[in-house]
Amino acid sequence: MKLLITATTTFFLTIAAAFLLLASSGIVSAQEKDDIPTTAINSGLFTTLVAGLSAADLVSTVSEPNGPYTVFAPTDAAFNRLPTGVLNCLLEPENVDTLSAILTYHVLDRQVLSTDLPEGTVSVPTLSQGEEIDIDLSSSSISSVIKLNDSATVVNPDILTTNGVIHVINQVLVPPSIDVAAFMSDICGIITETSSTLLVDIPNTAIDAGIFNTLVAALSAADLVDALSAPNGPYTVFAPTDDAFAALPEELVPCLLQSKNKDALTNILLYHVVNGQVLSTDLRNGLEVPTLLEGEFDLTVDLTNGVKINDSTVIKADILATNGVLHVINAVLVPPSIDVTAFLETCNSNMETLDESSSSTSSYVSSFLGVTTIISIISTGAIVSIVLCSDAKGCY
């Protein structure tokens, strides 16, 4: 069984501010590249990973002229999600073999770009004595998601270096040969923490899930990420999946993500949020639930055939977060005050001015998510000094 330790992914400045920051700092350059360790060091995002490579004497292994390699690189935030004391224990000299096994489990012995991956799941050997990781590429008309071992998500792919490529991931991977609980208790003397300590807040729970890419992009465009982040809350979010957004008319999502339609987008998103934590066990048939969108009709709960919220169906309930709960729904809820047909007419006239290649929901949201991921990494507190998404074909 492949073990992972959930990482928190901190995110989102505004897109405009991020681009101004990158441009004014002069740090976006598609021309200048360094090898893998230098790229990691210069980024400022992988301080813990670099320290681990040094402690395990692996820096020279992944340096030029060796390679090419593919490195799935956990951010500092990912390492910070490890149970207290584990990282320090791994960095002790007597545990160098375990540390080395974990780090090399993140490395492939060839360069694999996101565009090289087939649809579906493939098992690929790593430098950790050939132990394999499962790489899953799933695509919809909205976006593509790359997950490792069914849980870790590639939050930014295809950072090119002179001797390979780095894909940024939001969790630390552990090879199946390592018993994490035994290592913590027997070697580190740490009592295993309960799963509740691994919870993250609502936005991070959504991005970790990997099925809410459009919702995450929309929250960022509407400047609602901070509002739904800890310590705010608790909230209940009825969260539409990427497939739910894909079922909308093709022009609707790109139009909603335009800055001039921020109010309409905000209203739609707030119509999915309830103040307070409402678990599935708290629901009753016919219950009317007020949302954060004031002045609108309440959401109506129907339990006669499964769990329905208005016209949507809850397909997974009670995903707990540190500041509330998410219920996954299969359709986007639209407030009664928004006339979708009339809104689409304004969208159609505006979308005619867009380039044909960027007017589709898929390409528009995908490129938006690529920028959003850059912003999420910037907001961890370090200035990015590498091109996080230099090739539009590799942005997901």
Image (cartoon, grey):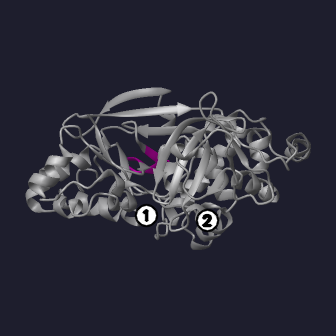
Please name whichever residue, 246 or 141, is drawn nearer the observer in this view of the structure. Answer: 246
Q: Residues within 10 Å of mark 1 (few under 14, many from 20)?
A: some
- Spatial CA span between label 1 and label 2: 28 Å
Please name whichever residue, 121 or 391, is drawn nearer the observer in this view of the structure. Answer: 121
Q: Residue 377: x and y, percent?
A: 49, 61
In which quadrant of the rendered view does residue 54 lie? bottom left
In magenta, the rendered stretch is 153-166
Residue under pointer 2: 227
In this view of the protein, can residue 29 be seen by the observer?
no
Query: Magenta stretch: residue 168 in it?
Result: no
Residue under pointer 1: 43
In which quadrant of the rendered view does residue 396 lie? top right
Q: Residue 320: x and y, percent?
A: 46, 50
In this view of the protein, can residue 338 be seen by the observer?
yes
Residue under the point 62% across and 27% down: 305
Residue type at mark 1 is: Ser
